[in-house]
Image (cartoon, coloured by chain):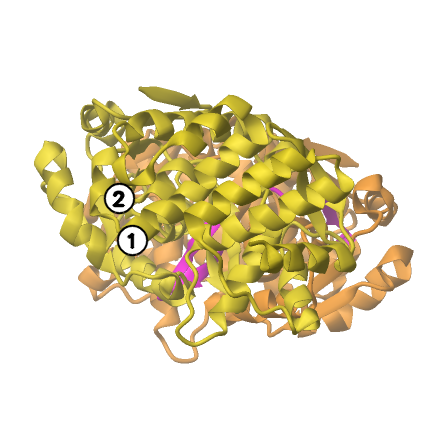
Chain colours: A yellow, B orange
Amino acid sequence: MKVNASTYNVHVGEGVFKALEELLASDKYKNSNIYIIADENSVEHCLPILLDEVESLKEAGVLQIESGEENKNLQTCIDIWGALTDGNVDRKAVVINLGGGVIGDMGGFVASTYKRGIDFINIPTTLLSQVDASIGGKLGIDFERLKNHIGVFNNPQGVFAHAGFLSTLSYEELRSGYAEVIKHGIIADADYWKKVKRTDLESVEDWDDIIFRSIEIKNKIVLEDPTEQGARKSLNFGHTIGHAIESSFLGIEGKHLLHGEAIAIGMICEAFVSYKIADLPLNELDDITDYILALYGKQDIDISDEEGFMNYLKNDKKNQAGETRFTLISRVGNYLVDKQVSQDLIFEALNFYKKER
Amino acid sequence: MKVNASTYNVHVGEGVFKALEELLASDKYKNSNIYIIADENSVEHCLPILLDEVESLKEAGVLQIESGEENKNLQTCIDIWGALTDGNVDRKAVVINLGGGVIGDMGGFVASTYKRGIDFINIPTTLLSQVDASIGGKLGIDFERLKNHIGVFNNPQGVFAHAGFLSTLSYEELRSGYAEVIKHGIIADADYWKKVKRTDLESVEDWDDIIFRSIEIKNKIVLEDPTEQGARKSLNFGHTIGHAIESSFLGIEGKHLLHGEAIAIGMICEAFVSYKIADLPLNELDDITDYILALYGKQDIDISDEEGFMNYLKNDKKNQAGETRFTLISRVGNYLVDKQVSQDLIFEALNFYKKER
């Protein structure tokens, strides 16, 4: 299966490795050096499978970096730029990002800025990166504790999503990625939302179908609005409050939230805001809240420092002229962008989450 | 006068400041914060003129950095990104680069990567940046002693070239910028070349005409080939050997060459190579050599370390698969790209330069 994403294709399911082999065998890359960027996890669990399946990667260089969001920073970029420079890597070279969102975002940024840009290919290995980060062209690194603060928009030459890699993930990581799948249903497709809810995460038989449908939804939105002037903002549902929650947990020793766990909380809160000011029917708010709480459980969020929490919210890239803008839903499957929400309502929503069940 | 450069305009001569005022007053920038990036020289000599002419810039923030190629690096980017972050600068903000090539290249790169890209405008203040660096979308910084090694292609929202700023330059800086004017004549326009040769640099009456024609030539080439797959390589004439000479001088205490001074040497050497393998007529080689030597004098270049010099050449971004590619001329006004040149011929050309007169 493949999805056409303007200048490149996203391949899913059977035949992904064959499609990758064909791309690498094309005239364009005939004399190109290939460098695989990976972390210790993808080197251990995914690289052997990849090398076994794709003959032409046997000679590729491997640049291993340390895993973790805390390494998605300029210093790691400097290390990779330095390795490419020391290897006399020229403009015809191609970089393959083998890993989750950190590898894809940062590897893409490094490739897009090395000698003003060399080609890169994404092989996402987590559910989160397969259904979200690896497509859409958002690249970057964290800077001064702000997520993806430095970066560019640029597309890969191809994305190859192999569901087999998901078996190397923990249940928590899988569930974290699933938050974006849930979001795709809620903002764009009520039927998909029904299917998503019925799926038992611990015994999924056909990941390919889910990955494919999520990529289709995201891709359609991104093609309509690549630089996030309008439609693309729909993908921010759950992410305005979710990112602030994620940031607020970063400050607490030993209490790390995965991205999707924070977005799950954000989706409940933003559904509540949607119920309050965007006519979301009460039964749909209940439906979203019940399902997400059942799947993710409840986190003990601390919102006593209102000002601190609002600072996290205000640093969001989506904001303009100091105003916090939200993406809301009027029904499951229908979004509204650029909605102003008062600080009072934001905390009413957070308290709604805290009090549920 | 203005030149249309696909997505933006380049303004030259009378009315540049009025055109800038109009751009800043457009709906797009109605609520935008404006930040001027400048160095101590442009802050002293150019900023007062700009603020006097453009009312809407009175409230703009000024980010002052230290002048010099040695500061065109990641650390300065980190300082500017940090200042923008601390100022809570949002995506609607616009950056104005007021200065020479260093400010334009680095300020454009910083703007293009801050929050995945905010708008920027160029106000080039040197001849070199007015006729060359401020248009064409090549942005970046130096990395590990390699020029423009990290960067992106991205266009400004407008370029405003005010010849009045040139009166603040030394003769050497003016002459350095003039090397690109000479190049434009040699690669693209034999009539312009005649005019360029007749011009007395110390008493130019109408810089606007020269700036305008050079921008027209460069713009036409860039529009034809924005990402340097073919035609744009013509702009590299003189720069393959010129960059290597520039790099080799960086290592010598107290012997600094300006960019144009190195390119002048490169143009003589590459004209000689053109005479040897691209049928450039001898009288045209003589014409180019005589004129450039008369204007720039002769530098004492040290080419005894052949291997060292070849390493500088090989690090050129234009190279592919380890091969050094040259842009040559078959006549003044006609270029040829991607020509392979042997190491022997490169040193024959360098010795030709050393022995002339």
Looking at the image, residue B239 lies above or below residue B62: above
Q: Which residue lies furthest to the front in this view?
A: A357
Q: What residue type is labelled 1?
A: Leu
Q: Which of the marked residues, 2 or 1, is nearer the chain's N terminus?
A: 1
Residue at (75% x, 37% y) in the render: A278
The reply to whether residue A296 is in sight is yes
Q: In this view, does A257 lie to the left or right of A308?
A: left
Q: Residues within 10 Å of mark 1 (few under 14, many from 20)?
A: many
What segment is highlighted magenta in the picture? B140-163
Q: Are marks 2 and 1 in contact (CB under 8 Å)?
A: yes
Q: Residue tagged by mark 1?
A: B313
Residue A123 lies within the magenta run:
no
Residue at (40% x, 54% y) in the render: B242
Q: Residue furthest bottom?
A: B253
Q: Residue tagged by mark 2?
A: B324
**Residue B42 picture location, percent across and down:** 71, 67
Would you say the magenta stretch is mainly helix, strand or loop? strand
